Image (tube, helix red, strand yellow):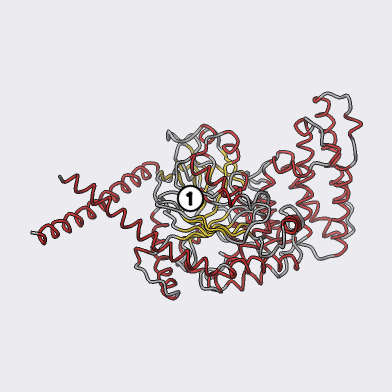
């Protein structure tokens, strides 16, 4: 009798598993059918077929890697591990290369299923993925960072072609100059090319936000993710093929297919923190620090100065000629003198409307100064390049046009699409760092079912802000997130080099690794000094600074190798427990259903 009961239980269990599989396929089929009716737009909270296929192939490689590390598990128990690089401009871009380099040397890189990035981390992701075999040869990526920048002529040739397009924006200028000057590589390939590659590398996912919905829309309309297969809004589950991002849609129908954007342009969309006007509050000269002043016309004046100053910095990195560099020094002096000249006396006893008038006049004076300077260089070739650049940049600065991309949800009839998206022919994709400076939103919940997140932290500001913002975001969208011990947050002025925030049940575990920490800074003062020395908004780093950040990031991984190995092993157990729990739930539901 016992044997008979056991056999019946096994039979029911197998029957239930088969039924559950059929049910899942049926649900997926309904989702795909809906997608088919919309032709090019897919609405689903599940992985698309292309990503699922890549993940399945990647797991085979991870299984072999785990075996080489003497971690034995089955294919079903391969943990879902994601490394999420934070934002932080060139500090983050260089830091991520250093982290990945050391992970490769320590034979840990092939345990990663996903690699996610925002802002500066996407710059280095764009660069490393240009090599189809990068995860087995990080030396190439490091050598490129230590090499020479792309010359200005090549950058301007790309810019001249791009300027002919109707959705040309400041993000394109930012993208080409950060590619050429900081990453020292301009990649003409398309992101969707990655979809046809083998699974040698972790699956890449970039994060951005939609600028208008970030300010005026619901949380579901804010986070935007881009993978080799799909691009779209994470929480709404609305996606279009990545190759069609930027094509013209209306009511879900493809009206005009445009060429897919290249990686240079995509880098500009993903890593343009200056697109957020809030950033300019870091650059207010003392004479303008008057209540109400920045809200009364001064904001446009400040953003004009800041973008010009940053673009000059980036342009410097593409030039070697001493005379041309001297000319650029002169321009930056003109800009700084204009902004720092104390004009407060002119504003005394004036109304806010009169303030606006003054600032509009000073805007024109600043632009006039740039145009006059552009005719001054003695070198004719450099003068031609400068004139071309200013002719393209200045009109866009006045419009403050960033991240312009055709909106695939324009007049889309789905009930989940907020008016901030459905009513506009274009949306504006910009740096996700203003929402959360790590791509946590794309890796929470059941869709990618992550067991372990490795989070090297390169951000500026409050060291634990990305964690607390992600926790709050997860609560808003009702997704699991591990509990953060308040004692950890007390370390923000002088953090340790590694924290393990343990997940329970469906929560992922997070290994949080600050770039500057107690291992490389003797006290809180040195930590603060290092953060200032390697601040986000400054000229492109010198060779010595690049090498320092690389070595610091490498050391953080090397020093915590044993912690990472332990957490990877625990992630295998976490995956096993989740699978057993799911099987038990399926069995119980099926048995009760059959009874």
Residue occupying the point 71% across, 59% down: 155
Q: Residues within 10 Å of mark 1 (few under 14, many from 20)?
A: some
Quarter where residue 5 is shown: bottom left
Image-based side of 213 in relation to 36, left or right: right
Direction left: furthest residue: 1
Q: Secondary structure at mark 1?
A: loop
Residue occupying the point 76% across, 44% down: 394
Q: What residue did someone put label 1 on? A: 482
Q: Position of residue 208 (x, y in %)?
A: 57, 48
Number of marks drawn: 1
Closer to the camera, 336 or 161?
Answer: 336
Closer to the camera, 237 or 67?
Answer: 67
Image-based side of 153 in relation to 203, left or right: right
Q: Position of residue 592 (x, y in %)?
A: 19, 45
In the rendered image, the vertical position of residue 355 relative to residue 39, given as above or below: above
Q: Position of residue 98 (x, y in %)?
A: 62, 67
Q: Position of residue 261 (x, y in %)?
A: 57, 53
Quarter where residue 31 is shown: top left
Where's the C terminus, which quadrant? top left
Residue occupying the point 64% across, 65% down: 553
Direction front: furthest residue: 487
Where's the N terminus, which quadrant? bottom left
In the rendered image, the vertical position of residue 390 relative to residue 79, given as above or below: above
């Amino acid at each position: 009798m016992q044997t008979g009961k056991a056999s019946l239980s096994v039979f029911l269990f197998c029957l239930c598993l088969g039924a559950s599989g059929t049910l899942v396929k049926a649900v997926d089929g309904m989702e795909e059918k809906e997608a088919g009716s919309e032709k090019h737009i897919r609405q689903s909270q599940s992985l698309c077929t292309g990503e699922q296929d890549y993940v399945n192939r990647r797991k085979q490689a991870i299984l072999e890697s785990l075996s080489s590390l003497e971690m034995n598990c089955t294919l079903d128990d391969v943990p879902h591990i994601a490394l999420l690089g934070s934002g932080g401009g060139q500090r983050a871009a260089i830091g991520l290369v250093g982290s990945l380099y050391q992970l490769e040397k320590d034979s840990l890189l092939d345990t990663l299923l996903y690699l996610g990035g925002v802002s500066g981390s996407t710059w280095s992701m764009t660069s490393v993925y240009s090599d189809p075999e990068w995860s087995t040869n990080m030396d190439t990526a490091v050598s490129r960072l230590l090499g020479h920048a792309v010359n200005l002529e090549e950058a301007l040739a790309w810019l001249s072609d791009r300027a002919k397009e109707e959705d040309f924006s400041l993000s394109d200028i930012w993208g080409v100059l950060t590619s050429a000057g900081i990453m020292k590589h301009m990649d003409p390939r398309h992101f969707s090319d990655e979809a046809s590659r083998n699974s040698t590398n972790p699956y890449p996912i970039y994060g951005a936000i939609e600028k208008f919905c970030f300010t005026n829309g619901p949380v579901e309309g804010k986070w935007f993710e881009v993978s080799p297969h799909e691009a779209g809004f994470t929480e709404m589950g609305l996606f279009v093929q990545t190759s069609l991002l930027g094509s013209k849609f209306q009511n879900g129908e493809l009206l005009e297919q445009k060429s897919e954007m290249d990686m240079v342009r995509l880098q500009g969309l993903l890593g343009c923190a200056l697109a957020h006007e809030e950033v300019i509050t870091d650059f207010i000269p003392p004479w303008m620090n008057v209540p109400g002043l920045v809200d009364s016309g001064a904001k446009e004046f400040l953003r004009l100065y800041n973008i010009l100053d940053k673009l000059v910095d980036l342009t410097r990195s593409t030039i070697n000629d001493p005379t041309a560099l001297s000319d650029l020094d002169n321009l930056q002096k003109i800009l700084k003198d204009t902004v720092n000249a104390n004009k407060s006396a002119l504003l005394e006893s004036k109304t806010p409307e009169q303030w606006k008038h003054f600032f509009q006049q000073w805007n024109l004076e600043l632009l006039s100064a740039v145009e006059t300077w552009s005719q001054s260089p003695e070198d004719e070739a450099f003068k031609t390049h400068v004139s071309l650049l200013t002719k393209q940049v200045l009109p866009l600065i006045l419009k403050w046009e960033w991240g312009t991309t055709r909106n695939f949800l324009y007049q889309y009839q789905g009930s989940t699409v907020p008016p901030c998206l459905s009513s506009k022919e274009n949306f504006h994709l910009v740096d996700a760092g203003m929402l959360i400076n790590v791509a946590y939103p794309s890796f929470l919940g059941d869709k990618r079912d992550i067991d372990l997140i490795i989070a090297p932290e390169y951000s500026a500001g409050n060291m634990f802000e990305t964690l607390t913002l992600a926790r709050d975001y997860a609560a808003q969208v009702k997704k699991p997130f591990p509990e953060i011990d308040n004692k950890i947050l007390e370390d923000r002025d002088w953090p340790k080099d590694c924290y393990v925030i343990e997940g329970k049940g469906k929560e992922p575990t997070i290994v949080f690794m600050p770039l500057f920490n107690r291992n490389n800074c003797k006290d809180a003062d040195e930590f603060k000094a290092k953060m200032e020395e390697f601040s986000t908004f400054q000229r492109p780093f010198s060779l010595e600074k690049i090498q320092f950040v690389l070595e610091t990031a490498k050391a953080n991984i090397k020093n915590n190798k044993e912690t990472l190995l332990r957490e990877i092993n625990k992630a295998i157990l976490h995956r096993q427990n989740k699978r057993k729990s799911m099987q038990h739930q399926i069995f119980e539901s099926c048995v009760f259903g059959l009874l």
